[in-house]
Amino acid sequence: MASSNLLTNQRLLVTGGGSGFGAEISRQAVNEGAKVVILDVSPTGQDVADEINAKVPDSVVFVKGSVTETAGWEAAREAAVKAFGGVDSVVNNAGWSYHTKPTLDVTLEEFNKTFDLNVKSIFLSVQAIVPLMIKQGTGGTFIQIGSVSHLRPRPGLAWYAASKGTVSTVAKSLATEFADKNIRFNTILPVLTPTGLMEQFVGVGQHDKAGHEKPLGRLGKPQDIAEAVVWLSSPRAQFITGVDLPVDGGRHSEYSYSQETKLTPQSNGLSGRSGLKYVIAVCIGYEGLRGLRAAVHAHTANIMLALDTCAYFFLPTCYSSKAAAHTAPNQLTSR
Ligand SMILES: NC(=O)c1ccc[n+]([C@@H]2O[C@H](COP(=O)([O-])OP(=O)(O)OC[C@H]3O[C@@H](n4cnc5c(N)ncnc54)[C@H](O)[C@@H]3O)[C@@H](O)[C@H]2O)c1
């Protein structure tokens, strides 16, 4: 894609740049004029750095290390200072999930690895890089790669979705805390995208089916995520902080839309709890009028007739309206 030089003079630290989103984020950032440090446990980070440097010399430095260890962050920070003079943006991209499976089968090791990779890494990034940004005095940005799964949790990925929900929450909290230092925190929420991690979510051979479920009719591409990262880390987004940005072909919106369409039979006129209240009010009013009339004529039989009439005609209506109020939520979650 043609460059707009959105990231001229910007220095990005991209975690997990050895494959998937991180590799494409690194390519596009350099294409937009940035310098990049890749932090990855895999030596493939060096391959990506070599590939990009072959086109734009001296634009990428690779540091082999883990985002779950302070030493990895310190090494990446020192490399960025030495090669490029500092860090303007951190892209907390490296992440992990266990295979989709019944939650009772998830092991403690898998739970710990999920939160270490997806959440502890952000804690360590803040500890290592925020002081540097404050010292530089020119602000900065942190972009987290979260997941649309925290807006639309699904069975079998509970702890992964929870970890990504934490990512979004933490980013919003940090956005408010460091706003006075002009350090912005935002989270991108990708949808299923064919990378090394996708097989964990949907299994081998399920890609096409997953793609057709999106309103825009396809899976995500690493380029979609990289474009969003470039914009959010650029000065063009200088007034954007504390947001979740779904990059998901409309998947998160589709959920609300489906709720609306599935509610149609109950959503006209008397439906749900408001319908129940209306019918109860009519019952009470009718019964009251009949009772008053009966009292005036002092005919006990009339009072009994009024009560009987109410019970006969309106109690079934109340009951069915109440039942509708209880069944509607089940329909919402049945997809
Ligand atoms: N692919 C999807 O469908 C999808 C959807 C939503 C969110 N995400 C998120 O996107 C991010 C990137 O995932 P991806 O799909 O590109 O996966 P990927 O597996 O292709 O890439 C992950 C990279 O992180 C590196 N990594 C793993 N552990 C590390 C560690 N301890 N320290 C440093 N680097 C480490 C890996 O070596 C790899 O290069 C993750 O946070 C993931 O949760 C992915």
Image (cartoon, rainbow, N blue to C red):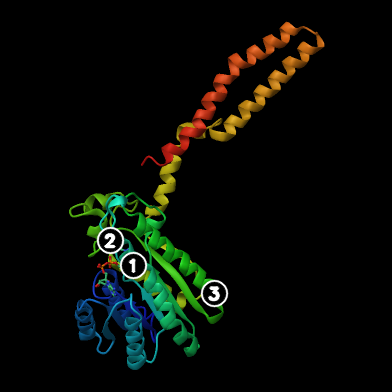
Task: Rate crowding at label 1 as few (under 14), some (14 to 19) or many (20 or more) other CA atoms within 10 Å.
Answer: many
Residue placed under numbered mark 3 in the picture:
177
User: Toward which corner of the image does residue 290 lie, by quadrant?
Assistant: top right
Does label 2 or label 3 sit earlier along the sequence?
3
Q: Name the element at disc 2.
A: loop
Residue nearest the observer in this picture, 87 or 74: 74
Residue 246 image position (x, y, % from top left) = 40, 61
Question: Mark 2 touching mark 1, by CB under 8 A?
Answer: yes
Question: Mark 3 touching mark 1, by CB under 8 A?
Answer: no
Image quarter for ligand 1: bottom left
Residue 314 image position (x, y, % from top left) = 60, 19
Residue 184 image position (x, y, % from top left) = 48, 75
Residue placed under numbered mark 2 in the picture:
193
C-alpha gap between disc 3 and disc 1: 26 Å
Label 1 beta carbon less than 8 Å to ligand 1: yes
> Is residue 33 visible in this depiction of the protein?
no
Q: Name the element at disc 1.
A: helix
Q: Amino acid at mark 3?
A: Glu
Residue 10 image position (x, y, % from top left) = 39, 84
Does label 3 or label 1 sit earlier along the sequence?
3
Q: Is residue 44 above or below residue 155?
A: below
Instruction: Report the quarter where the C terminus lies.
Output: top left
Task: Rate crowding at label 3 as few (under 14), some (14 to 19) or many (20 or more) other CA atoms within 10 Å.
Answer: some
Which residue is rendered at x = 48% and y = 89% of the image?
135
